[in-house]
Each structure stands twice: as C-alpha cells, then as structure tokens.
Image (cartoon, grey):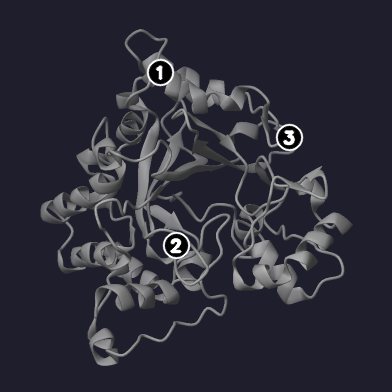
C-alpha cells in the first residue's frame, strides 16, 4: 500500500524536531511553554510543520529550483555568497580545505584527501574546461529547507530573529548520495524592520497552501529574503551566514578506522568562507580530563541555562575544537566528578554529543533515505525535540 509521506511527516513533525550541532534549546525540559493570554486562539491555530518548519516534500526538493542554478540549488547558494569575489577562488577557499591540514585556533584539522577523488575531481570533469568548478553542475542535492524560529533571541538565549537553513547532500562520482551533508545556516535579516513575529507569520502562511506550484512560488519568495545577495545589501560581509556546517564519514572510507567528522565554516571580514572552530565543542582530547571538569564546574550555571560559550583557549591550552570528531554512535562526553544532569547538559550541546549517544542518533539528523529519494530525519528530531517549536510557532504567528 502506498504511504502518504506528507501525512506521516506532518504527524511526526507536529510532535518533534531537534536542536542542531552546537546549539542549546531554549528550554531543557522538553515541555511546551505557556501559550500566553490568547490561549483559545492559539489552541485553534494549526501549525503544519512539514510545510512551515521543516520542508522535505519531494515536490520541493525535486523541483527545478533545486537543480542547476535554480533558487534552491547549492550552485545558487554559493553563487550569491561569492558575489563581489572571484567565484572560483571563493569555491576553492572552502571546498579544497579538506585536501591539506588546517589550523584553527591553534588546533590542527587533519586532511581528508579523498575529497579530491570522491567529490572535487568528478565535479571539475563535468565543467567545460575540466579545470574549474561549474556551480550549475555541483554534485549536491537539496535535502531540506528549514525555518529555525527557536534560535531567535529569547531571554538570554539565541540571537537575532531566527535562522533559515538550506540542507544539501553531497554525491559521489557515480551520482549516489554519500554520507556527507552541508548545511548553510543563515541569520534571518532584520535590516528592513523584520521581527520574529513577521518572519513567523510569513512561514506560517505556507501551511494554508497545498504542495504544488503556488506553494513553491511563495516559498521561493521567502528563501530569497535570506539567500539572495540582494537581501544582504548594506550589511557587513558574513553577517547573514551564521555558519556552514558539514557532517561526513565518506572521506575516510577505506581507512582502518573510518571516522565521522563535523566541520564548521564562517565568512571572514574579507568575504571568504573559511574553517572555523565548531560551536560549543571542545577538542576530543579533552574528553574525561580534569581540564574539562574544571571548565564545566566553572560554567555550571550557564551550561544549565543554555548560555555558555566554549572559547578557543581555557587555562592557557587550546580548547575549542577545530572540528568535531565522533568516535562511535554511542559517544557521550565524560566529565569526571560532576553531577549527571550537568554532564548531560554540557554533552548534548556539543556537536559530537548531539549527533551520537546523547540523542541515540546514528551521526546524521538529516540525510538521504537508503530506499528512495525521500529525506530521512532522525528519531531524535521526530520524537524528542519538536513540541517546543510548534508551540513557539503558535505563540508568534497565531495571536
């Protein structure tokens, strides 16, 4: 019997969606927050999460806009980001960083040279001259368009008015999807008077439309407001893209011990997209050490209320990770001598804790289904984290 994938996803997403790597949820209780004075109106409001918050329907991710230089393609995203710069140098500036060791905040990220064989050489071979990276032929496909209203400034947590995200899968020489994702995480602009409420209302309006041409046209209007270079005019370089995050194991296939690794990139003051330290995640060498225990104890209150930061150095030693390595899918950070609730609050906020043992996740929260073209979403996202976000959407968009 053919299953209604939108119906299944809507039911699941109405229940839950997860925080991302290096992020702390606004509430650590997992309970929906009070919905405010206009309780009756909010109760009657219906949030269709599959259309408003986490969009993976095939009519969207397989639309022509997601191919070539269409408005939802990897090629278009990078093209807009590279405007005002040499496009090929911009692409090389981040895509070729896997080929050599990179030093970030005093810590070395080891090269993953199979990037050349699996991704870069096949991509160049498709270009007319065989030497450059033709963005229209980039080996990436759209997995999801995501609205992260929960990352807006609220009390002492978050910043700005939220995030818009474009999630892509990287493909190998044979065209098959690799276990390798790239997520462009944009700060939603507020330079023209936009507010958290106005962004929420615009995304909420999508829920009233059936998937199809009209829906896609409306969604394109929204994504253009944070992806298009025009939306960045008058803003400092790098002020719209919070970060690009990657998650892969494909580049260590064939090694004695393949290892998942998460990397982060940010746009610097010159407009180049370069490796950066990963959010809220110490280097793995600090796991189960007295130094980590000292850090966690000194920052106990902030860790528990979700406002802590992990700096590049702690007590004179390089501390924040240049990348986040994930040894096993059961990995959790061990912090000697601290209470379990504090250890867990610290660990789940890290990239490698969130993508492994703390959430019972097999490394990828969003990836390509093994059995078809659909996007697969982790159980943690579908079963644990979403009630707060649906309630949040109601509180902003439905009053």
Circle 2 SS class: helix
Please name the residue shown 15% across and 63% down the image: 210
Whether tag 3 and tag 2 are in contact, CB under 8 A, the answer is no
Circle 1 SS class: helix
Vertical side of 126 occupied by 399: above or below = below
Q: Secondary structure at mark 3?
A: loop
Task: Give the number of the mark in front: 1 or 3.
Answer: 3
Q: Residue at label 2?
A: 151
Q: Residue at x 28, y 38 (%)?
A: 233
Q: Position of residue 154 (x, y in %)?
A: 45, 70
Nearer to us in this view, 269 or 16: 269
For marks 2 and 1 on the same chain, the one whose residue lies earlier in the sequence: 1
Residue 399 seen: yes
What residue would you read off at disc 3?
Answer: 106
Picture layout, residue 273 above or below residue 362? above
Question: Which mark sits nearer the N-terminus, 3 or 2?
Answer: 3
> Separation of disc 3 and disc 2 at Cα?
29 Å
Does residue 360 lie above or below 266 as drawn?
below
Q: Which residue is mark 1?
A: 88
Mark 2 vs mark 1, foreground winner is 2
Residue at the far left: name it.
Answer: 214
- Label 2 and label 1: CA atoms lie apart by 32 Å
Q: Front-most of 241 and 4?
A: 241
């Amino acid at each position: 019997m053919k299953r209604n994938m939108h119906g299944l996803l809507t039911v699941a997403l109405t229940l839950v969606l997860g925080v991302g790597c290096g992020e702390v949820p606004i509430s650590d209780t997992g309970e929906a927050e009070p919905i405010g004075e206009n309780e009756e109106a909010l109760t009657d409001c219906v949030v269709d999460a599959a259309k408003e918050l986490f969009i993976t329907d095939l009519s969207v991710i397989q639309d022509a806009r997601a191919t070539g230089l269409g408005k939802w393609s990897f090629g278009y995203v990078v093209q807009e980001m590279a405007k005002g710069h040499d496009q090929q140098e911009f692409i090389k500036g981040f895509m070729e960083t896997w080929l050599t060791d990179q030093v970030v905040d005093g810590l070395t990220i080891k090269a993953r040279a199979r990037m050349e064989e699996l991704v870069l050489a096949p991509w160049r071979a498709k270009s007319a001259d065989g030497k450059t990276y033709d963005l229209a032929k980039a080996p990436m496909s759209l997995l999801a368009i995501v609205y992260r209203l929960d990352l807006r400034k609220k009390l002492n947590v978050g910043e700005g008015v939220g995030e818009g995200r474009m999630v892509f899968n990287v493909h190998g020489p044979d065209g098959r999807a690799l276990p390798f994702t790239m997520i462009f995480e944009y700060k939603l602009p507020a330079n023209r008077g936009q507010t958290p409420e106005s962004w929420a209302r615009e995304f909420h309006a999508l829920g009233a439309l059936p998937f199809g041409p009209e829906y896609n046209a409306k969604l394109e209007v929204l994504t253009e407001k944070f992806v298009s270079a025009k939306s960045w005019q008058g803003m400092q370089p790098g002020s719209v893209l919070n970060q690009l995050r990657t998650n892969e194991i494909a580049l260590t296939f064939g090694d004695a011990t393949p290892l998942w690794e998460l990397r982060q990139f940010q746009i610097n003051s010159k407009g180049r997209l370069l490796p950066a330290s990963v959010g809220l995640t110490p280097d793995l060498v600090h796991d189960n050490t007295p130094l980590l225990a000292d850090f966690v104890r000194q920052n106990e209150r902030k860790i528990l209320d979700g406002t802590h930061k992990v700096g590049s150095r702690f007590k004179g030693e390089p501390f924040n990770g240049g990348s986040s390595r994930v040894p096993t899918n059961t990995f959790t950070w061990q912090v000697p001598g601290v209470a379990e609730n504090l250890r867990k609050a610290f660990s789940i906020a890290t990239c490698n804790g969130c993508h492994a043992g703390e959430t019972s996740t097999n490394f990828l929260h969003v990836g390509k289904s093994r059995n078809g073209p659909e996007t697969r979403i982790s159980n943690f996202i579908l079963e644990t984290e979403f009630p707060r976000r649906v309630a949040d959407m109601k509180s902003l968009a439905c009053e």
